[in-house]
Amino acid sequence: MKILHTSDWHLGQNFYNKSRKNEHERFLQWLLEQVTDHDIDAIIVAGDIFDTSTPPSYAREMYNKFVVDSNKIGCQLVLLGGNHDSVSVLKETQQLLKYMGADVIPNTNEDHATQVVELKGKGGEVEALVCAIPFIRPRDVLTSQAGVSGVERQKQLGDAIKQHYKDVYDAAVEKRDTFANRDTMPIIATGHLTAMGVKQSDSVRDIYVGNLDGFAADGFPNADYIALGHIHRPQVVAKREHIRYCGSPIPLSFDELKSQKQVCVVEFVEGERSISQLSVPTFQLLAEIKGDLSEIESQLNQYIGLEEGQSVWLSIEVRAQDYLSDLQERMRALTEDLNVEVLQLRRARERRNQSLEQESAETLAELTPIDVFEKRIALEEFESDTEKARLERMTVKFKQVIVEVSHGTDDLNGTEE
């Protein structure tokens, strides 16, 4: 039995207003080729199939086409919902896709047996079981209680997730005992969460903000392999080789360029497990450039003469002694004859820190909280529509916090509004 573990496709993503459609199409085609080349029996997609809860129509088409194409080559699918995925969107075609060999698990439920998926080998016999656990929403495993502190809530959530894993694993063990090959039948568990001690990237959104920062590895059941999603960098959890994040198949932020994209292949032969990785090709060139203006110009020379199909998406971080008011115009002039697109342009952190130090003569007593916030924000670049929307959300939230804090201070002082 050979199982391919992938996750965090984020179909429909816009990257600094650039569509990833072409990259995703090529990745899915490559994935199908791996099924044939490596004799894969089943694919597990550990969450975040889509980038948003309302994916564009072309993303849904890619998703459905992949299921159909997988069915044609006899590959079973286990598709888990992630924190980016809409439960209702995944449920729309859940029953239909079941007829094409795809088990879609949008969310958790109390009927634990429904989250145990059978994987069949080439001979049509069940050869493995999957505890198909998607992203666990707090409301799915916890009952709201009044008067519970944040720390208590955090512990309750961690305990509830651990118990859910145990319940589904116990259901899988009970089912395994009904098979003649139970002694060699592996049980695989899945998950879409942040395990403690992992390295994240800029594109990963916190999924238990205020409740659970990370899930301890000892909370997972004694499964033969645990296929995780949500963290975009491939890595082993808590030095346990069988607990893994495979990572996203394409870079979803520039800082993900530091690690090779991959999918994991897990093979079970007579109860013995082996794990290997397949490197995912680069379907769109991305690169980071850092330095002062002369260094950046020198580094840009490597892109002279690129053909039309080799366009590079760039992140440029400028280190400068003086504040450059015409930074965008200078970058445009340096790149206008090159087949590159500058998607991210920012000043180096050192320069931003220097600006803060230069204003250190202003004491906090002389500034309002809004003044401090605006001075810090002024050191960042918010160029795209997405970044501007993020700035607006941060500003509104900051002002709300100030109001709440000021009201709390008034209450302590015994004043009334």
Image: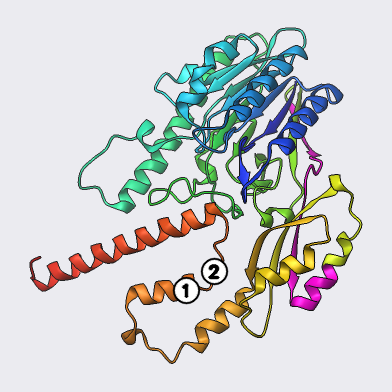
Is residue 187 visible to the viewer in this orientation of the structure? yes
Q: What residue is at 78 percent from the left and 68 percent from the top?
A: 334
Q: What residue is at 82 percent from the left and 55 percent from the top?
A: 339
Residue assigned mark 2: 380
Q: How many marks?
A: 2
Asked whether the residues under the numbered discs 1 and 2 touch, taking CB atoms below 8 Å apart as contact, a structural biologist would say: yes
Left-right relation of 378 to 337:
left
Q: Amino acid at mark 2?
A: Glu
Helix, strand or loop under label 2: loop
- Which stretch did the figure color magenta? 272-299
- The CA distance from mark 1 to mark 2 is 8 Å
Q: What residue is at 72 percent from the left and 68 percent from the top?
A: 331
Q: Position of residue 99 (x, y in %)?
A: 61, 8
Q: Position of residue 178 (x, y in %)?
A: 57, 9
What label does residue 376 carry, if any? 1
Left-right relation of 108 to 296:
left
> In which quadrant of the rendered view does residue 118 lie?
top right
Q: Is residue 50 magenta?
A: no
